[in-house]
Amino acid sequence: MNTPRVKEILGWYGSDNPGTLTSLARILNHGRLGGTGKLVILPVDQGFEHGPGRSFGPNPPAYNPHYHFELAIEAGVNAYAAPLGFLEAGARDFAGEVPLILKINDHDVLMDEKDPYQAITGSVEDALRLGAAGIGFTIYPGSAHRLDMYGQIRGFAAEAKKNGLAVIIWSYPRGSGISKEGETAIDVTAYAAHIAAELGAHIVKVKLPSAHLEQDAARKVYEKENIPIGTLTERVAHVVKSTFDGRRILIFSGGPTDETSKFLDEVKAIHQGGGFGSIVGRNSFQRKKPEALQFLSDIIGIYSS
Amino acid sequence: MNTPRVKEILGWYGSDNPGTLTSLARILNHGRLGGTGKLVILPVDQGFEHGPGRSFGPNPPAYNPHYHFELAIEAGVNAYAAPLGFLEAGARDFAGEVPLILKINDHDVLMDEKDPYQAITGSVEDALRLGAAGIGFTIYPGSAHRLDMYGQIRGFAAEAKKNGLAVIIWSYPRGSGISKEGETAIDVTAYAAHIAAELGAHIVKVKLPSAHLEQDAARKVYEKENIPIGTLTERVAHVVKSTFDGRRILIFSGGPTDETSKFLDEVKAIHQGGGFGSIVGRNSFQRKKPEALQFLSDIIGIYSS
Amino acid sequence: MNTPRVKEILGWYGSDNPGTLTSLARILNHGRLGGTGKLVILPVDQGFEHGPGRSFGPNPPAYNPHYHFELAIEAGVNAYAAPLGFLEAGARDFAGEVPLILKINDHDVLMDEKDPYQAITGSVEDALRLGAAGIGFTIYPGSAHRLDMYGQIRGFAAEAKKNGLAVIIWSYPRGSGISKEGETAIDVTAYAAHIAAELGAHIVKVKLPSAHLEQDAARKVYEKENIPIGTLTERVAHVVKSTFDGRRILIFSGGPTDETSKFLDEVKAIHQGGGFGSIVGRNSFQRKKPEALQFLSDIIGIYSS
Amino acid sequence: MNTPRVKEILGWYGSDNPGTLTSLARILNHGRLGGTGKLVILPVDQGFEHGPGRSFGPNPPAYNPHYHFELAIEAGVNAYAAPLGFLEAGARDFAGEVPLILKINDHDVLMDEKDPYQAITGSVEDALRLGAAGIGFTIYPGSAHRLDMYGQIRGFAAEAKKNGLAVIIWSYPRGSGISKEGETAIDVTAYAAHIAAELGAHIVKVKLPSAHLEQDAARKVYEKENIPIGTLTERVAHVVKSTFDGRRILIFSGGPTDETSKFLDEVKAIHQGGGFGSIVGRNSFQRKKPEALQFLSDIIGIYSS
Amino acid sequence: MNTPRVKEILGWYGSDNPGTLTSLARILNHGRLGGTGKLVILPVDQGFEHGPGRSFGPNPPAYNPHYHFELAIEAGVNAYAAPLGFLEAGARDFAGEVPLILKINDHDVLMDEKDPYQAITGSVEDALRLGAAGIGFTIYPGSAHRLDMYGQIRGFAAEAKKNGLAVIIWSYPRGSGISKEGETAIDVTAYAAHIAAELGAHIVKVKLPSAHLEQDAARKVYEKENIPIGTLTERVAHVVKSTFDGRRILIFSGGPTDETSKFLDEVKAIHQGGGFGSIVGRNSFQRKKPEALQFLSDIIGIYSS
């Protein structure tokens, strides 16, 4: 049975049909955090995004697509997200064992671009035939291609929602519109999360924000209104607020942090700030499996507390 | 993780995509029988089939569509099957709490027909928007309309399978082609189950067969080959064999048995004969809830043993 | 490489695309008769057509759909034909091991009909997703429904041909238009084969004809022109001639002959009369497997000679 | 019957339907390497890619499209791949004699481009009407057009898979994103193979990699993790690992090597490194036929050992 | 009846349906060269391409679209090719009197372009409603737009072939990828003809090639292999060879030659080199009619010899 918290969360998605709520419930009720309203997702699009050597060289069993299904299942995360090929390579073998999210656009680093874009690599039909609970899509607010990307996800999201799937948007500010530092600026991160929610995402994923303020017009207001952004917890809380006052599921990615303790501190800040969870790729699958399981267990432990 | 038995069962459906396997796994892994490969389904199409007074009068809370969701959830059955309206009336409220099966054709008793037929009352789109794990469809082998019904489910099944849903066929011999006694004759029941499997059903539902042999041509073979059909267990085993030698999930309905102990004996026979489970409607929702929960618990207990 | 005889046969199908020729070549080149231009096909639609007990009771391993794939493969027949469910139950497990023919309409005997008809139970999409080399379709010349059936196969055949599949028509005279004896009358059989060829079939299947002449108008011509129909070989030759003067592949089914030696004599007559082969269902899968393999081997031996 | 190795390979493609498995089996079971799980493919898109004089001048009979069908058949390779025109010019004449792969995009050298692209020159419908077992598609990771190309093959692959065809991706790093030397760098080659697999390819084709490391971010990992790339065998093994840990069929092209013995040494390295085979164009069809047959026989001999 | 030569030519198009063969036969069997396998086509797209004054000023009756139908019919050429408007203006009046080819893309000279392109000006539907035997399409190998043009004709050719029409590609190297001299270079001409054939053209049209070699990589091979290109006859033979070894109909245009005798010498070279005929526009319709008829008669005379 759905816990009161899960029921509350589902209650925010009143314009979605019961099919999409069922898919969201599949994600929210699965794994060790099932029912808490918090979630940890394992994403493995690194092979496509950074190349296989960089991604899996540090932990060679991770070259095998089955490895990630097994890691997700054994760790008890809420869902496993990956591009078409990686999901196709295990969806039958692990049918029903962990909710899947099909990443339907992807990007490589084989070209230096001022304004990044992504290729369409999957579809709602693929998600349905693979039994996924949702589709994942990246947007690059700040890129010259952002408007096209917003338009693309509009179409995919509408189709996903009609078919009872959840929509997860990876919102990564990047491109010629903003500075390097601005990519994780608190104003830009909050803005990026809000745009994803406005595009109809059920789950929004952003990077942890810094205290930097990128846009002058924004800085004036942040300063005038004394919006607290000094601590990571405060910044998480601000992004949560920016994402429909907490009425959309907002999760954070960590990036390439090396130190485990620092990463776990960040997770605590997400938890305290009212964030809904973490999406942990590299930091988990690049460790040896026992270590990765311990690491994910620690993260889950924080969110359970 | 899927149990070895669930993995074995999923292995029979090699022509289905991982999405459909995921839906089957959702059903097989849910509830108190989750993982055993046995299943109990609560069907409530009686209101449509027999009228509300006849159906819910004996237990008035059952007029409320929420009642059946709650009964299914509390009893821990594998799935709840109902027509469009009943599902629409609760699918949001109970999203994700029990696998749903949308019955997409239905029949009433407002006309006495020699050759019964059913109305198309739902669609694959409906099943997806309601978050159902599968569609249910009734065929009437023996009716003059049976060929049309076979053709209808062909189309619905193809669409369901493409979209990752499971297909459940209620195969009820009835109509001018057979006698009243023949409706549950062992030869006819085995035939009806086989036809449903040939039509591509993942789960086949038939009534418990009697020892009667309806068709002369069949009787000759049953007698010549000494096919054992003396006991209910033997008859169940024969129907299981007739349904692709046990490589399709076959469940049985009980009909309007009054005596609980006789019903449970039948369940034991189904279990011993290798049947995969029971679909129990009237016999559960027409009892008071505590009684119904005890009754379903007893049934589940038998299948767990 | 295609033998001269296979090249000659393929040469008759000049209006078909290379995809359909490839599918025909897959059938003609497979198994022990590969390359000879003769063919033996194993059809198992008996479960649907007559019921599982009557069909598989005499040889219980045949309840299992895998049994028939294995029988077809071990016997080295050219192709295996069955309805949707039976093919779905083994198509992944035996992918590429024997050419498949998906029977896309089927009939049961649960109703006594003056004018038989069949249900549509499969599609060209199904044939493609299952990897079949062709579709099979039954028509009932003589039935009041025959014109609808001709219209149905027209549509299916057009779609099959566009997608590179072969079309096999089972042409079974039956219905209120003809007498029981007329169902296998030589004039009616020749007529039924010709209609199937006119409908665009690549392979035509009829029953072995008797010397009976059903239609008065036909009898006059047969007698006036002294068309030789006295022996089975002559009758086979006449049906071959009637099927585009031998420029369409014509095969014969045997029916429920009990005596092996009589059956083999009929095969000899088919071979001598210029028939292209046999489709042998009940007579093979109702025997114990070693016996069935010997029997099919004897048949294949005759066609190889 | 499929060998255990072929069964194992087919088992990796659990998200594909039996039709696609059948097409893969047609390729894996054909020719002298049939059943070994290794494969040699003859591709003749050189006429389009480099012009007829450069391609066929050295061996004038190769101007004739029939020549290549005959070469493929006589040499006993697993499949023959070519653009639309070349396949159309022989598909009827050689129907069923060798599995065909329709190259559905192509490129010429009539313009010097910094960022190469290809024209769409065929379709899934064409592949079906020509009886092909699969479609071939080139992507240029490193080109500014790569994201569009990824998006194109997504659509074609989805349609091919639905219709039971195999998908072969030629992954050729090229374009302004990488250096000339980088086109065959080991990190880039492994990356290109991985991307093709993520895009859903059943068979991936790359060039033999050099020991060069193109990307700084990759070099750091290769050095830190001591990924062995010193010998060609090691590099092949690394690319195999990068292609889903060997769970996708990966084959290599040789390029314009002049020396036969050096080419065969490379084939040995592919074989030892766990590569699945070679795709040999220019190096075979530019030799006189007896020489080409001997050469292909030597290659096949290595893979058979 | 088709002559042996026409039968031989039609035999090269084994992947086309009888409808397309019928259209090709209509062209090959029409006019004074009917049955010889040689053909002369009258194309009048000059009005669109160069403007009416430049095109028809020298012979004012040619402003009238009927003039060209009449010229084609009286001269006994095999077919008349023109853009939509010119065909629409006479198709009813001369219905069935001469095979028509609808040019479905066109270009004007109202802008100086480095990389020429063409507008889509007709469709397969237009060709069918006008009774045309085929569609004509221009590609510009060497233009930055060439890949798009290849993709366009792929779609049109597929549709034309399905509907029984012939496909004629005008392959005119032009654009920033090649030099002015390179437009008629022998290597480029052979390449352009080959590409058209690979794109699935039934009839390919190129300009008469010069002895110039444009591409370094090609020159090396031409010199090494001693490909004879010294005389026009040799060059024609080389282009014929490059167009599937003569297994595609290849015709040549003359360009703006003023001298009749030189033009006729070129026709002799085409004939001797194995070319299939000429497409003669300006050189015929810009002469007074009696002269034009004499001129075309002389050309036809050469091909008849």
Image (cartoon, coloured by chain):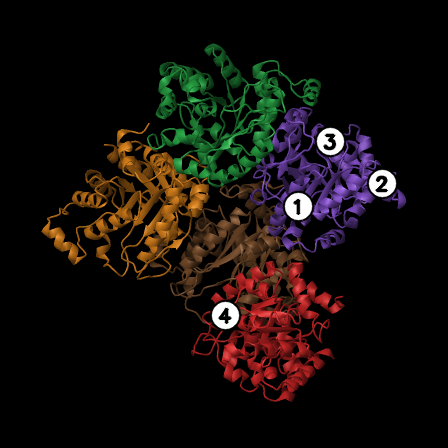
Chain colours: A orange, B green, C purple, D brown, E red
Spatial CA distance of label 3 from label 4 is 62 Å
Q: Residues within 10 Å of mark 2 (few under 14, many from 20)?
A: some
What amino acid is found at the position of numbered circle 3 in the picture? Asn
Q: Amino acid at mark 4?
A: Val
At label 1, the amino acid type is Val
**Chain-order first, disc 2 or disc 3:** 2
Of E232 and E1, the residue lying toward us: E1
Q: Are marks 4 and 1 on the same chain?
A: no
* Front disc: 4 or 2: 2
Q: Which residue bears the numbered disc 1?
A: C167
Residue denoted by label 3? C283
Could you tell me residue B251's position as x and y percent? 51, 24
For the residue labelled by badge 1, is the local secondary structure a helix, a strand or a loop?
strand
**Quadrant, the C terminus of chain C:** top right
Read off the residue under disc 2. C219
In three-dimensional space, the C-alpha distance between marks 1 and 2, rounded to whole angstroms, equals 31 Å
Label 2: which secondary element: helix
Q: Residues within 10 Å of mark 3 (few under 14, many from 20)?
A: many
Dot 4 and dot 2 within a common chain: no
Q: Position of residue B38 (x, y in %)?
A: 47, 24
